Image (cartoon, rainbow, N blue to C red):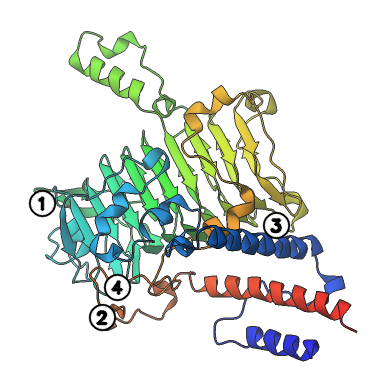
């Protein structure tokens, strides 16, 4: 009887209509390349189940208790059943160094009704480009599923929120998103992928200004000299350069709950090894005319700027190679992320950045030459020995190892501490919903921007490779996890049933 049930369950998992899992391993138990991973997966699932059951038992009188996951961002807004009518509550839920990003809070709602981007100099009202260049705070929403194929880089003005909750919104094409010398931007629940270089043409950046733009790099999101930025619950993949780059004195950034996949150089933080403002160093050169107003402005600016980035609750997924992130100077808090099988390394750096890694799970690839989590880029050991890089409460899987350096004193990491880390044993629970939520992604019962139908207005996304990202593979990852659980259960049951 047990054998028959197991056969049926495994058959249903393997022949379900969702795309096949490329990582599925159908070898016999004794031939599995890493039986430790199977055992650890089972233990994690059991522990998570016990934890959830205890939480429910301890909160039987609280009807909303089953909603809480321990992820402080999601628990802040998603458990409110009336959140579609209280969307701007999201602006109060940021954590980490980007917690002061207000986005378009207290501004008017702008509804994107036109998915075109035909004229980057004179965008039509109703388009996304028309919204992001406006000077006033705006909370930008999408009443239908949309594919927005950019003709040129999308240059934002300050105090904007892109809120894709309740719709399946994809941004692809030329240049993608540019945040240059602005502040207070929230980008939430957007698919960003297949971005390529654009430029050498005129592009509008405000209602009163447009100018010539040189060729862009093809980043998914380019943050240049900007502050108070929060990127949450997005998916990023398949871009020409970086998925997210933050350079030229950018600071106050939180990158959370995102799903990264299919890319080489994932994330660059810091302009260059010699760009001292990213470390908050002051100007001491008398050649800058110390009696001029410019000198005092420059001195104040450099004494205030310090590259500070929080990377939390993200899933670094399939087919990533390196730079998760690569840091130059600054203070980086990497907390409660799930790193799965990089090809070269996960966290790299140069120029003496301070890296505080807490409560993450690092699962190394099977390549014996790529087990190290860290990489000091083009730097001798005698130099990087003094850099403050620490691993605190991380889980290292499949032979992964993290080479620490510098001093382990808590005071050395005060500037690289931005949010209380949770136990790495809860990583599955904390990152389960990484990436966009709701329509077209994972079913989290997220409604449209106003209460009503969840159908997305009937808009049909393109079906070609340029119009899809890899969020659909989340179904495969979920199916693989259940396959491991069912397979392990059946193996144990058959071992004890005569």
* 3D distance between C-alphas at marks 4 and 3: 36 Å
Nearest to the eye among marks 4 and 1: give it: 4
**Residue 220 location, quadrant:** bottom left
Task: Give the residue at mark 1.
Answer: 207
Q: In this rendering, does residue 318 appear at all? A: no
Circle 4/circle 3 CB separation < 8 Å: no
Q: Residues within 10 Å of mark 4 (few under 14, many from 20)?
A: many
Alpha carbon separation for disc pair 3 and 2: 42 Å
Q: Nearer the N terminus, badge 4 or badge 2?
A: 4
Give yes or no for contact between labels 3 and 2 (Cβ–Cβ under 8 Å).
no
Number of the label disc, if any, that sits on residue 365: 3
Closer to the camera in the image, 178 or 357: 357
Identify the residue under disc 4: 146
Residue for point 41% across, 60% down = 234
Whichever of labels 3 and 1 marks the residue nearer the N terminus, that label is 1
Q: Earlier in the sequence, mark 4 or mark 3?
A: 4
- The local secondary structure at tag 3 comes to loop
Q: Is the N terminus in the top left, top right, bottom left or bottom right quadrant?
A: bottom right
Count of numbered labels shown in the rendering: 4
Q: Residue at x 46, y 27 (%)?
A: 274
Please, is residue 255 above or below residue 19 in the view? above
SS assignment at label 2: helix
The answer to whether one can see residue 436 in this image is yes
Q: Is residue 193 left or right of residue 215?
A: right
């Amino acid at each position: 009887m047990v054998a028959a049930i197991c056969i049926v369950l495994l058959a249903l998992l393997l022949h379900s209509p969702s795309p096949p899992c490329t990582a599925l391993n159908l070898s016999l138990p004794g031939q599995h390349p890493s039986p430790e991973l199977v055992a650890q997966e089972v233990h994690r699932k059991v522990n998570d189940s016990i934890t959830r059951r205890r939480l429910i038992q301890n909160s039987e009188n609280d009807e909303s208790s089953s909603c809480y996951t321990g992820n402080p961002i999601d628990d802040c807004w998603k458990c409110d059943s009336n959140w579609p009518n209280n969307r701007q509550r999201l602006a109060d839920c940021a954590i980490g160094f980007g917690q002061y990003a207000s986005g378009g809070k207290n501004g008017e709602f702008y509804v994107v009704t036109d998915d075109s981007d035909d004229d980057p100099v004179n965008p039509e009202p109703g388009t996304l480009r028309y919204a992001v260049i406006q000077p006033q705070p705006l909370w930008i929403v999408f009443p239908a599923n949309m594919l927005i194929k950019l003709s040129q880089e999308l240059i934002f003005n300050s105090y904007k929120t892109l809120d894709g909750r309740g719709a399946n919104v994809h941004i692809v094409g030329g240049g993608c998103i540019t945040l240059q010398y602005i502040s207070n931007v929230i980008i939430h629940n957007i698919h960003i992928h297949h971005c390529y270089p654009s430029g050498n043409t005129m592009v509008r950046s405000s209602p009163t200004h447009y100018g010539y733009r040189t060729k862009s790099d093809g980043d998914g999101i380019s943050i240049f000299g900007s502050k108070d930025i929060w990127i949450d619950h997005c998916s990023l993949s398949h871009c020409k350069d970086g998925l997210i780059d933050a350079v030229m004195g950018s600071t106050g950034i939180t990158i959370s709950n995102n799903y990264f996949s299919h890319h080489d150089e994932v994330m660059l933080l810091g302009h260059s090894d010699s760009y001292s403002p990213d470390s908050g160093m002051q100007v001491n050169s008398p050649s800058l005319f110390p009696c001029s107003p410019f000198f005092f402005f420059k001195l104040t600016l450099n004494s205030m700027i310090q590259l500070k980035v929080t990377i939390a609750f993200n899933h670094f997924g399939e087919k990533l190679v390196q730079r998760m992130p690569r840091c130059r100077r600054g203070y980086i808090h990497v907390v409660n992320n799930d790193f799965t099988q990089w090809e070269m390394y996960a966290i790299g750096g140069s120029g003496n950045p301070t890296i505080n890694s807490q409560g993450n799970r690092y699962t190394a690839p099977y390549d014996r030459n790529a087990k190290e989590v860290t990489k000091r880029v083009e730097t001798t050991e005698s130099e990087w020995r003094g850099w403050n890089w620490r691993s605190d409460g991380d889980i290292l899987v499949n032979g992964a190892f993290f080479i620490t350096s510098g001093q382990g004193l808590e005071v050395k990491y005060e500037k690289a501490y931005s949010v209380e880390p949770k136990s790495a044993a809860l990583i599955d629970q904390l990152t389960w919903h990484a990436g966009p939520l709701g329509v077209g992604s994972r079913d989290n019962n997220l409604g449209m921007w106003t209460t009503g139908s969840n159908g997305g207005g009937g808009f049909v996304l393109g079906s070609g490779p340029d119009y899809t990202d890899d969020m659909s593979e989340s179904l495969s990852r979920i199916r693989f996890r259940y396959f491991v659980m069912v397979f392990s259960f059946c193996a144990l049951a058959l071992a004890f049933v005569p």
